[in-house]
Amino acid sequence: MASAVQKITLSPSRDIPFNKLVLSQSNVRCVKAGVSIEELADDIFRRGLLQGLSVRPVVDQAGAETGMFEIPAGGRRYRALELLVKQKRFAKTAPVPCIVCDSGIAEEDSLAENVQRAPLHPLNQFRAFLALRVKGQSEDEIAAAFSVNFVKQRLKLRQALGERPDVAFLAALHVLTLKTFYHYGSDSCLELDLKSVSFGTQAPGLNDSALAEAIRAWHESWAKAVPKESADLWGALREWDGDSQAGLFAHIVSLSVNAVYEPWNRRPRAFAHADQLAQAVDLDMAAAG
């Protein structure tokens, strides 16, 4: 007989007046980091409290609840609300959404909230800011909501990169080289991908031909030319001369060529483009085949 799957019970949530809340000595965040309390207070005033506080009942020496609640997780949000109270922008008796815990260890609540929080990837931040721009918010409005320097750095990056074709080429070369020669190609904020095509299934024996062997040898020579560690790639590519950068880029792009006829994958425009490429590189496709 299969054993029953154990199910968890979540701690109840409730609104607690602000003046019934106190900071807990169990909060593990002692070093200031991230957005300031003043900026967080302004954000809460603008959009409300997006995440409730984790609290525990305060008990007296006899173990009886006193009606007060300590906050082991959510201290910065409490400080921001406290500042709003001092600024008379939030009533001291106003209800605050809280999750009430009465089991486990308070320090564990605080540690879990801070350690298990996943930071947002810079690319996702950038996309979100662009989405706000598309929906009508100005750069100044976004900057006011999310810290001026933080936002402007990311919103200006796209514009600045678009004005520097040389750097844009290097950035594209960098990310495509990461995707081609390294197991983990995520050391870039550019979302470019490359699909390297093998023709073994479409043309049996082609991968063992002299031409395929020459391409593999050329690929191995480039693999030896790039650094062993992906973290060193950007600096190395910047030191290369233009011909070497262009040669690597051409090799990587060539790996993605797929102009083989497949009955299940009709792509007439792709074949027409293959003919255009052949003309551009002075290749007689009929003679080559």
Image (cartoon, rainbow, N blue to C red):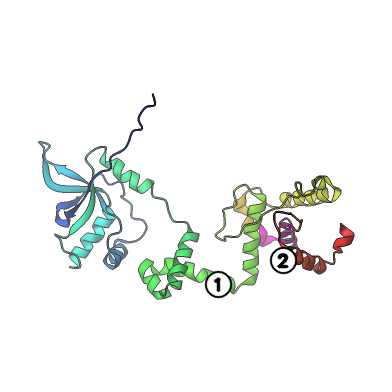
Residue 218 in view of the camera:
yes
Q: Residue furthest top?
A: 1
Quarter of the rendering occupied by the N terminus: top left
**In the picture, residue 187 is in which quadrant?**
bottom right
The one nearer the camera, 130 or 261, is: 261
Q: Tell me the CA gap for discs 2 and 1.
A: 34 Å
Q: Is residue 162 left or right of residue 240?
A: left
Say which mark, if any, is on residue 160.
1
The residue located at (33%, 55%) in the rendering is 32
SS at mark 2?
helix
Residue 241 in view of the camera:
no
In the image, residue 186 lies at what x, y percent? 57, 53
The residue located at (64%, 71%) in the rendering is 165
Say which mark, if any, is on residue 269.
2
Magenta extent: 236-258
Q: Amino acid at mark 1?
A: Ala
Q: Nearer the viewer, mark 2 or mark 1?
A: 2
The secondary structure that most of the magenta stretch takes on is helix
Q: Report how many numbered discs are placed on residues in the image.
A: 2
Answer with mark 2 or mark 1, whichever residue precedes in sequence.
1
The one nearer the camera, 284 or 16, is: 284
Q: Residue furthest front?
A: 263
The residue located at (38%, 46%) in the rendering is 115
Q: Amino acid at mark 2?
A: Arg
Q: Is 284 a magenta residue?
A: no
